[in-house]
Image (cartoon, rainbow, N blue to C red):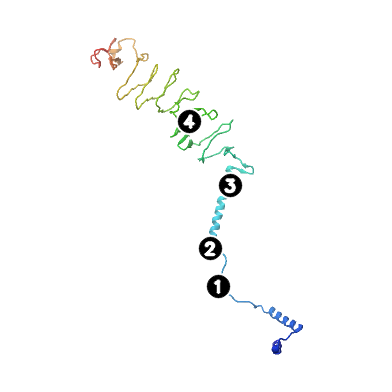
Amino acid sequence: MAAAAAAAAEQQSSNGPVKKSMREKAVERRNVNKEHNSNFKAGYIPIDEDRLHKTGLRGRKGNLAICVIILLFILAVINLIITLVIWSVIRIGPNGCDSMEFHESGLLRFKQVSDMGVIHPLYKSTVGGRRNENLVITGNNQPIVFQQGTTKLSVEKNKTSITSDIGMQFFDPRTQNILFSTDYETHEFHLPSGVKSLNVQKASTERITSNATSDLNIKVDGRAIVRGNEGVFIMGKTIEFHSGGDMELKAESSIVLNGSVTVSTSRLPTSSSGDQFGAGEWVRYKLCVCADGTLFRVQVTGPHMGCQVSDHPCGNTH
């Protein structure tokens, strides 16, 4: 019926536009709305989902994203462990570090006992303690080594050694007085004030001397070896050698004893009677000297025996 009315309206409007009444417009609008409300398939187009463009991370990109997330999680766990270790060792709290202090001058002060291995300073370093407290550095079955460049100070259980290729010097930080230095071109080596003796295992130097009013005593518990590449010269007002064993003098060319040579007979064996010379219990020698300074020995076979023997190496006078 609506179609017939529409056809009639078209026939009537062939001669020109036909105005509709308000009722006709309302009926037409109602019919259109009713048709649209009952048509559920209006504007629906069936589409295959496989042909649509897919969004998001899929395939290899998705696997890569999962790997990145796992890696970030592992790094976060490692960072958490390091943070806990630093917090437990340094003891960081709301008021700062519990075991150390940082100062604007660059000073790092440890307030508690600290366990360290190897410390590498960036530029220059100074190690010190408080004014009225001792600085205690302990090595657990290991030597304590301070090293800066080629200079090394090693403190061990039985010895303390200092080695350097460029030399060293010790001075008082308050008075700046040099106590000891290896710069022999500027000044000679002197023992610090109050030190009376120097105990070394081996010393290499050009000369050893004492002042004019003191004696120079060299004492050893075992064997003393004095060797010079260009000779050994011993000079003094009085020179004394005390040896508990043998004394040996070696030279490539000659040995020169310039001055009076005295042999003390206080420790030489003596006898109350002359009968022991022929008994074979003692073998004695007499030290003789030639006019030219040659020394030789003569076996003593009887009392009051002199150096007049037939096989002496001297001339007529001895």
Is there any visible trace of residue 72 in the rendered image? yes
Residue pointed to by mark 3: 84
Classify mark 2: helix, strand or loop.
helix
Residue type of the residue flagged with mark 1 = Arg
Residue pointed to by mark 2: 61
Quarter-of-image position of residue 53: bottom right
**Residue 212: x %, y % from top left:** 44, 18
Classify mark 3: helix, strand or loop.
helix
**Residue 314: x %, y % from top left:** 25, 15
Q: Look at 29% across and 13% down and name the residue there.
A: 277
Is there any visible trace of residue 117 in the rendered image? no
Horizontal placement of 318 versus 191: left or right? left
Q: CA distance from mark 2 to mark 4?
A: 67 Å
Residue type of the residue flagged with mark 2 = Lys
Classify mark 4: helix, strand or loop.
strand
For mark 4, does the 10 Å Cα neighbourhood hold few (<14), some (14 to 19), or many (20 or more) residues?
Answer: few
**Residue 109: x %, y % from top left:** 58, 37
Label 4 vs 1, first from the N-terminus:
1
Residue pointed to by mark 4: 169
Q: Eyeballing the image, is 265 above or below 182?
A: above
Q: Of the residues tagged 2 and 4, which is closer to the observer?
A: 4
Q: Of the residues tagged 3 and 1, which is closer to the observer?
A: 1
Residue pointed to by mark 1: 51
Total number of numbered discs in the rendering = 4
Q: Look at 46% across and 35% down and name the residue there.
A: 151
Q: Of the residues tagged 4 and 3, which is closer to the observer?
A: 4
For mark 1, does the 10 Å Cα neighbourhood hold few (<14), some (14 to 19), or many (20 or more) residues?
Answer: few
